[in-house]
């Protein structure tokens, strides 16, 4: 299969969008009227989609890719999570709740009420068939001056004892926990600038962690990792997901002005800590994407993954990777977005852009081999004016819920084949971005959209071998405009939201086209 060509139908940036003063090259076209449809000459063909690194060979999509964070307190919410098609759930447990007094630690005990709460949360997760990823955080005051670390040196054996107890207790059915993450965003530093404090208040101080103490974090890993493996050789240990963004120390010259240490992971590795975690975990948010896209191939999560993977390989580390927090919001502040012409504009969040971002971020994650991506968060919360959830507080699905479910259906058991040959449009910003997957039932599925622009459409032609039929559907699973298909060439209209295009061989294994099932 190859992409033949694309032609612009329309491309216009809305007047309400503002230029983002983050780049001297930023530009928009405020007030520009929508252009009439017109046929244009084919654009120049590129060997790969703009910002999409080519796959060296087909790779299986991880069974745990569709992760989630939040909702595990409520069995009703977990039923919704199951309906969405999630495979893994990150759950947070606090050491200071389970062992508030040192006597609990010395007696290998867990505080009964906190233990009951944690076990109820785990049961909510495993009862709907999800794999729990347990994040351990919040040290008690008797073990650390700050809840998120570092530990008092003489209390490291107490931490090892606590983690051993957790692994021994919860490795058994019905919980069967295998994935353990050690400390939330440990790269947060102690020195918070006056500007950050003025904006976020004293609550930001609670996030201070191990960021200035990479060597101590490495010593913690070297003590706790072998103890965990002695208890359960099958346990998978994750470093605490680093923010690796919004840098406040050792800034690389971008995504700065915050509270995280750019060199934290390097400090941990140079102190010998690479021996003692199985999976590299980090967080990824849309607001920081332009910085990564300037420095690594790929868009958004793909660019950050590629950059971090390259930095780790330079240090001799090559491990599986998971993203423990990724997100966007359906209301609230605008987010910077890099167009294909280099200009940076603001995306105003809405229910539609929320769903579109979710669709793109998981597709891109699959193309760079991420093992799991946990969306933050499943459910809107009253304190969060940005509304990050894919369901409302009342558990009513938002468009992002259906987008998540559609992704889960398409990527479950799939193999990533590679990027499509792409074209830059010859009028205004925008480029075709697309990827090919082999679905679990043997069908080829192509995810394709117009990237690098905030609005627009293009007609794309695909060359198929002899095929029973070609169908297309939207990111939420609704039937899209029926492709014009002559038995060999299919023409599909795509916009800035992903469209899925599939060839359907009619045989005894698949009696209905996928569009009919999606309805």
Image (cartoon, rainbow, N blue to C red):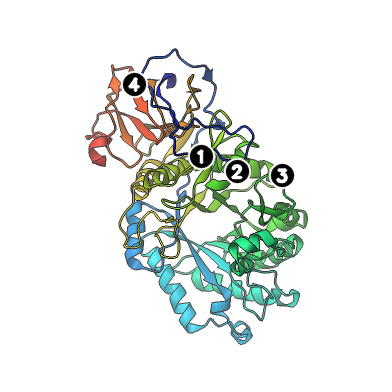
Of label 4 and label 2, which has the lower sequence position?
2
- The residue at the point 59 percent across, 63 percent down is 200
1 or 3: mark nearer the eye: 1
Residue 174 appears in view? no
Per the image, the residue denoted by label 2 is 304
Q: Please state the horizontal and vertical placement of residue 11, each as a whole percent of the image.
A: 43, 26
User: What label does residue 253 carry, if any?
Assistant: 3
Eyeballing the image, is 332 above or below 141? above
- The residue at the point 37 percent across, 59 percent down is 129
| Crowding at mark 2 (Cα within 10 Å: few <14, some 14-19, many 20+) | many
Local SS, label 1: loop
User: What label does residue 437 carry, if any?
Assistant: none
Of label 1 and label 3, which has the lower sequence position?
1
Eyeballing the image, is 429 above or below 329? above
3 or 4: mark nearer the eye: 3
State the separation of the CA atoms marked 1 and 3.
24 Å
Q: Please state the horizontal and vertical placement of residue 49, each as a whole percent of the image.
A: 52, 28
Per the image, the residue denoted by label 1 is 18
Q: Please state the horizontal and vertical placement of residue 353, each as a whole percent of the image.
A: 41, 43
Local SS, label 2: helix
Eyeballing the image, is 148 above or below 38? below
Residue at the outermost top position = 41
State the separation of the CA atoms marked 4 and 2.
33 Å
Per the image, the residue denoted by label 4 is 491
Q: Name the one closer to the observer, 58 or 348.
A: 348
Q: Name the one closer to the observer, 414 or 486.
A: 486
Of label 2 and label 3, which has the lower sequence position?
3
Residue at the outermost front position = 31
1 or 4: mark nearer the eye: 1
Local SS, label 4: strand
State the separation of the CA atoms marked 3 and 4.
44 Å
């Amino acid at each position: 299969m190859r992409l033949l060509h694309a032609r612009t139908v329309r491309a216009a940036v809305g007047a309400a969008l503002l230029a983002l003063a983050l780049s001297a090259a930023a530009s928009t076209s405020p007030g520009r009227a929508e252009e009439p449809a017109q046929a244009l000459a084919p654009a120049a063909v590129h060997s790969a989609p703009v910002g999409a690194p080519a796959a060296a060979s087909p790779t299986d999509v991880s069974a745990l890719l569709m992760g989630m964070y939040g909702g595990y307190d409520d069995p009703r919410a977990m039923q919704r999570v199951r309906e969405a098609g999630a495979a893994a759930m990150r759950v947070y447990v606090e050491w200071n709740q389970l062992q508030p007094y040192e006597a609990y630690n010395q007696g290998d005990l867990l505080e009964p009420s906190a233990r009951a709460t944690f076990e109820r949360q785990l049961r909510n997760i495993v009862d709907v068939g999800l794999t729990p990823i347990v994040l351990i955080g919040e040290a008690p005051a008797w073990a650390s001056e700050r809840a998120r670390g570092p530990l008092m040196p003489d209390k490291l054996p107490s931490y090892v004892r606590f983690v051993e107890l957790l692994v021994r207790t919860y490795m058994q059915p019905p919980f069967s926990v295998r994935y353990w993450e050690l400390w939330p965003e440990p790269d947060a530093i102690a020195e918070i600038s006056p500007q950050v404090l003025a904006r976020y208040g004293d609550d930001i101080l609670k996030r201070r962690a191990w960021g200035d103490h990479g060597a101590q974090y490495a010593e913690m890993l070297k003590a706790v990792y072998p103890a965990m493996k002695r208890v359960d050789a099958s346990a998978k240990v994750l470093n605490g997901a680093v923010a690796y963004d919004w840098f406040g120390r050792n800034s690389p010259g971008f995504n700065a002005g915050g509270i995280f240490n750019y060199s934290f992971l390097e400090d941990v590795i140079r102190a010998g800590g690479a021996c003692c975690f199985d999976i590299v975990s980090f967080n990824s948010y849309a607001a920081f994407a332009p910085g990564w896209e300037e420095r690594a191939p790929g868009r958004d999560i793909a660019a950050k993954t590629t950059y971090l993977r390259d930095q780790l390989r330079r240090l001799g580390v090559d491990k599986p990777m998971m993203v423990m927090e990724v997100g966007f919001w359906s209301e609230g502040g605008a987010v910077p977005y890099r167009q294909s012409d280099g200009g940076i504009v603001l995306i105003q969040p809405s229910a539609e852009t929320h769903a579109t971002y979710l669709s793109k971020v998981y597709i891109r994650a699959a193309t760079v081999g991420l093992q799991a991506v946990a969306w933050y968060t499943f459910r809107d919360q009253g304190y969060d004016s940005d509304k990050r959830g894919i369901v409302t507080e009342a558990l009513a699905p938002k468009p992002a819920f259906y987008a998540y479910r559609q992704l889960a259906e398409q990527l479950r058991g799939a193999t990533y084949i590679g990027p499509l040959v792409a074209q830059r449009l010859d009028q205004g910003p925008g480029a075709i971005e697309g990827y090919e997957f082999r679905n679990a039932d043997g069908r080829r599925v192509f995810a394709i959209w117009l990237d690098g622009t905030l609005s627009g459409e293009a007609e794309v032609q695909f060359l198929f071998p002899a095929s029973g039929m070609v169908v297309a559907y939207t990111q939420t699973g609704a039937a899209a405009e029926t492709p014009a298909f002559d038995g060999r060439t299919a023409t599909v209209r795509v916009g800035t939201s992903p469209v899925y295009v599939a060839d359907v061989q009619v045989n005894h294994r698949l009696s209905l086209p996928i569009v009919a099932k999606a309805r």
